[in-house]
Image (cartoon, rainbow, N blue to C red):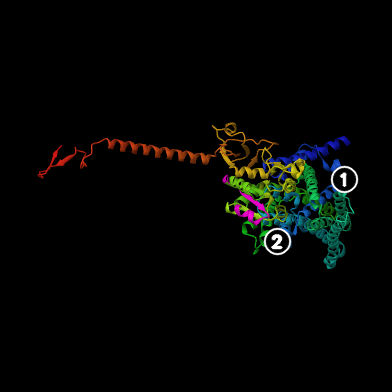
Amino acid sequence: MEADLTIKLAAIGAIGISAQWIAWRTGWPAIALMLLGGILAGPVTGYINPIEDFGELYQPAIKLAVAVILFEGGLSLNFRELRQSGWAVGRLVVIGAPVAWTLGAICLHFAAGLPWEPAILFAGILVVTGPTVIGPMLRQLRIGNRPRDILKWEGIVNDPLGALFAVVTLAWITYADTTGQGSVWEDIGLHIGAASLFAIGLGVALAYLIKFLFPRGHVPEFLKTPVVFGLVIVGFVLADFVEHETGLLTVTAMGIALANMRLDSFGEMRRFKESVTILLLSGVFVILSATLNMDILQSFELRFVVFLALLLFFVRPASVLIALAFSSVPWREQLFIAWVAPRGVVCVAITGLFAIRLEELGYVSAEALNPLAFAVVIVTIIAHGFSAKFVAQRLGIDQGPGRSTLIVGANRWSIELGQALAKRNIPVHIADTSYLALRRARQAGLETHHGEALEAIHADHLDIGSFQAVIAATDNDAYNSLICAELGPEIGRNAVFQVGTSEAAGTAALPGALKGRDLLKSGAGLMELLNRQEKGWEFRQTRIGEKYSLSDLRKRLSQESELLGHVKPSLELSFFTNEGRPAVDEGDYVIAYVPPGGDAADEEDMKERQDRAREAKGQKERKNAKAEAEAESATQPETAGSSDSGDAPATEDATGEGPKPV
C-alpha cells in the first residue's frame, strides 16, 4: 500500500511537470494541460483517486499548498507596479468584485436554478481568479506592464476576497437561522470583520518579525527559507483557527508586506519559492482534476450551460467594464481584462469545503456546486487559456515574443555589434552609466538607457521579458559576470553572454554558474576586441541558402575569423559558443567577426560590389568604344569641310560655280 501511494505521488509530480514542459515547448496553456493530465489519471483511467488515496490528509494538504501558492503570489506584488495600474486594481476590487458577486448570484438563481443561499455563496467564490491560473497564463503572454499588473494584482487580491465573501454568506445563512434577521449584519460585522482584521494584522506582523530577525543575524542563512515557510504555515493555521478561510488573508498580506521590504536575501528566497510553487501548483492542479468522478459528471445538467455562457460573456465583462468605466485604462486593455478570468485551485478547493457545510445545514441543492465548480474551471481554462493570445493580438496589445537584445556597456565594439544586429531587424538596447559613452550609440540609431542595468531591471525601467539575450561588454570583468549571474535565472543561463575575461582580473577561473557564456570562441576580452576594431575588424553577414551552406562559409573565412551567431527569419538570435553549436537552416543569416581581407561579405555588400563591378565594366567598355572611335576618325584625311549626308568631301572653286568633286 505504501509503495503504491509512493508511485502515485511520483506519477502526480511527473504529470504536472511534464504538462509545464510541454506548455513551454508548444505555447499551449499549462493549466489546460495539467487539467487534462489529471482527468486522464483520475476519472478516465481510475489510477489516481486522491480522496481515497490520501484520506484525511487530502483537505489539509490542499489548503496548505494553496496557502504557500498565495504567499508566493503576494511576494510578486510590488507597490511600484501600482504607479500605472493602482486605481484600476482598486476599482476592480472595490467595485468590480461586488458587481461580479451580485450578477453571478442572479445568474445562478435564474439560469442554473439554485436557491438564493447557495447561489449567493457560490457567486462569491467565483470572484476569484488567482495566481494558480493567471500566473502560468501571463508567463506565456507579452501584453505590456499595465494589463499584466492589473490581472496579477486582481487575481492575488481577489483570492482571499472570494473566500471572505463565502465566509460572510455562510455566516449570514447560519446566523439568520439561529438569531433572526434583526441582528445578523451586526454579528457578521463584529465577527467576520474582526477576524479579517486579525488575519491581515497577523500577516503584516509576521513579515516585520522576519525583517527584524534576518538583517541582525538572528537566523543563519541556511535556515532563512525554512523559517519563512514555517511562519507562513503557522500564520495560515492561526488565522484559520480564529475564522475559517481567513488564513488566505494572512499569507497574502504577509507576502505583499515582505515584497516591499527589500530584504538582502529576498532574491534568493524568491527564486527558491518560485520553484516550490511550480511543484505545488502542478501537483495540486493534477490532484484536484483527478478528484472528478463519473457521478459528478453525470450530475451536470443542461441548464448549467446557460449559466456558463452568461458567466463568460456577461458577468465578467459587465463587472470589469463597469469598474473601469471613465478610467485611464485604454479601452483595448479594458476589453482584454474583461475577457480573461480563468478559475483554478482556490475555486475548486473552497467550493468543495462550503458545499459540505451547506449540505449539513440542509441545503440539498448544494450537491450541484461541485460539478458546477469543475465545469467553471474547465470551461474558463479552455476558453481563456487558448484564446488569450489571439484576443490580445486582435486588440493590438500583444507585443509578440521578446526579440530585443540588451548590451551592457557602450563602446566602439558593442555599438558596431548593435548596428550589425539592428541590420537584421533585431531591436538593440544599450545600457551604460556614462552619458557621453551612450552618445555614439544614440547617433547610430540604437535605443539607450542611462543608468545601472541591474537597478533599472529591478525597478522595472527595463522589461527583462522583452530581451531574448543579454551581452555584458563593459571593461569590468567582475561586473560582466555579476550581470550574467543575476539575469541568468530570469531569462535563462543559455541566453546571457559576456566578453572574454582576463586572468589579471581574477574572473577567468570562475565557475560557469557565476558568469555568462563567452561570446566568442577565442574568449577575447574587451581590450583585445577594441584593438581588433582599430585594425579594421568588422561584422559580416551572410545568408545561408540552398547553394551556399555553412560549410561553404567556413571555407571562405580566414583562419582568424570567428563565427559570432546567426539570426533566423523569425528574428530568433543564437550565438556560437564553446558550450553549443546552434543549428543553422536555409534562410538564416550568419554573423561573422572578420579581420581585413577575411571575406565573408554579406548579401547586401556582395550585391553592391557586383553592381559596382558591372558599372565599372560598363564604363570601361564605353571608354574603350570611345577610344576606338577616336582612333578610327584619326585615320581619315583632313578636309576643309564635311557633308552631313556622308557624301564625299567637296571643295569650291574660285569662280563660285559650285562644288566640284575632288
Nearer to us: label 1 or label 2: 2
Q: Residue 209 carries which label?
A: none
Sequence-earlier tag: 1 or 2: 1
**Would you say the residues marked 1 and 2 are in contact, meaning their CB atoms lie under 8 Å apart?**
no
Position of residue 357 measured from the top left corner of the image (x, y, whole percent)? 84, 53
The relative height of residue 133 versus residue 7 in the rendered view (above or below) is below
Q: Which of 205 and 235 is in front in this view?
A: 205
Residue 467 is one of the magenta-drawn residues? no
Task: Identify residue type, mark 1.
Answer: Leu
Q: Which mark is residue 83?
A: 2
The relative height of residue 471 versus residue 248 in the rendered view (above or below) is above
Q: Magenta region: which residues?
A: 423-440
Residue at 29%, 35% in the rendered image: 632
Mark 1 element type:
helix
Residue occupied by mark 1:
57
Residue 424 is one of the magenta-drawn residues? yes
Position of residue 265 measured from the top left corner of the image (x, y, whole percent)? 82, 52
Mark 2 element type:
helix
Task: Identify residue type, mark 2.
Answer: Arg
Q: Can residue 226 be seen in this view?
A: yes
Q: Is residue 245 left or right of residue 430?
A: right
The relative height of residue 34 versus residue 165 in the rendered view (above or below) is above
